[in-house]
Amino acid sequence: MEKRLVLPPPLPPLVYRSSRVRIQVKALRKSCAPLYSSQYLFKSKHNPFAMSQYPDELARVAFSYPAIDNHAHPLLKEQHKDYFPFEGLVSEASGSALIQDAPHTMAAFRATIQLGALFGIPNPTWEAVKTGRQRANYNALCDISMKRSNIQCILIDDGLGGVKEFAEDYQWHDRFTRSPTKRIVRVEIVAEDILKDVMNDMLVENSLDPAIILRNWGERLDQELRRCGSDPTVAGFKSIACYRTGLDILQVSVESHGVELKRLLTITLLRYEATKTFRLAEKLINDFVVNLTLRIAQDCGKPVQFHTGLGDNDISLSHATPALMQPIIKAFPNTKFILLHSSYPFTREAGYLAAVYPNVYLDFGEIFPFLSADGQVSVVKQVIELCPTNKILWSTDGHWWPESYYLGSHQARQALYEVLSTCVKRREMTEAQAIEVIKAALFENSNRVYGLNLKPIFS
């Protein structure tokens, strides 16, 4: 059996903001030496970051080419670094399924070994890794994890629940990258905030006129989404319709569904007045938001990301397959659709859509580190079975913890190299072609699709 390559991405030079942080990072770097020892790097005693130490040009590109992370979330603020269970690093589960079961997955076993090496923990256990990171200086931990990820630019969805209370601003992440961080606007959150304001105004005026609610909400939502579309710091939009009411998105407009939208908005207002809680739970309203976003995105030329497949148990799995999106994709041929998270376990369906529709692209993220190593390789193989390689985009889906970015980058590079080097050995493609695929997947495709106009900057 061919031995799997285990090689971390090269360590870029670090830029420190204070002598205190410099000392702390040097101490962490010294403790992290096992990660770059001979047992991980082809049994070489030479500098592992020198270009001559890679076994071939394909490996050099796979593990050293800068990347654009086309979908991620903010890191926690230092005072909240332990707020969420660390098991969320390797699982979408919640409650006891997360705390008790996630540490017993292949994803957790592998992360334990890799993070144990990062923290210099011999014979690591999951609990030892958790203790090690809790004791580490947080700034140094972020520096080590993020800069070893070799990510040049991050596109951050800052609409994730908990971001406002516990996480850093998206621009804060610029300290770890060589190009400015951009925003991804989560449209359901924008729509909810605006509708809540409109309804609060109506309640103050003691008015329940659904026609006014629909008109005011629709106008203000249109204005805000267009403002975001023209904002150079915004790279695109994102929909979580998959979580709300499913991916079987109907074509909805005020003209075609005005009466039903007014009825549902009245129900939403009455529910809000009674419970003081607010969430867009009606399918027609959610689909209206998505349709409006797709029209505006078409006008401004920015992509719309869709959560597909893999997610927590708030998702109805039968409504999470991108195959359900075929009618809405056809209805908006000039809008760019990004299918997130490899659409796992519906990867082949997503690959088909990307193959037959010129406006559909497939992100292969979140499976790093949520799946086993073999599972990741299997998904990457499924991604390139049918999907054109100029339409695949990489992401970490990094969130809360800096280690999520590190593992997301390290493991993705490993899987890409393993799959494509095997294709080269089988004479299914040339090494030159495989190199171009890796460059495209990690950087060039996202750079083109999001209109970032970046040049790769090597560390």
Image (tube, helix red, strand yellow):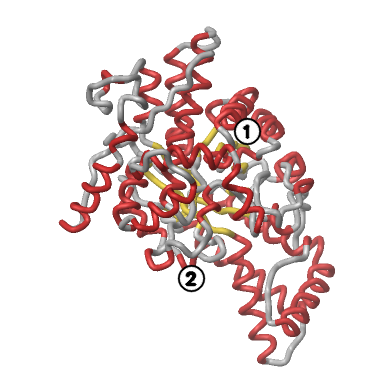
- Quick check: 30 left or right of 383? left
* In the image, residue 42 above or below residue 408: above
Q: Residue at x 51, y 12 (%)?
A: 429
Amino acid type of the residue that numbered disc 1 sits on in the rendered structure: Pro
Q: Find numbered disc 1 in the image and state the secondary structure of the residue it sits on.
A: loop
Q: Can you name the residue that lies furthest to the left here?
A: 19
Q: Which of 143 and 198 is in front in this view?
A: 143
Above or below: residue 78 compared with residue 422: below
Amino acid beneath label 2: Glu
Of the residues tagged 1 and 2, which is closer to the observer?
Answer: 2
| Total number of numbered discs in the rendering | 2
Residue in the image at 76% along x and 85% along y: 208
Number of other residues with Cα within 10 Å of mark 2, as a class: few under 14, some 14 to 19, many 20 or more: few
| Label annotation for residue 358 | 1
Badge 1: few (under 14), some or many (20 or more) residues near its Cα, within 10 Å?
some
Q: Tags 1 and 2 in contact by the CB under 8 Å rule?
A: no
Image quadrant occupied by the C terminus: top left
Q: Distance between the residues labelled 1 and 2?
A: 39 Å
Disc 2 target residue: 165
Which mark sits nearer the N-terminus, 1 or 2? 2
Residue at (63, 49) in percent of width and height = 101
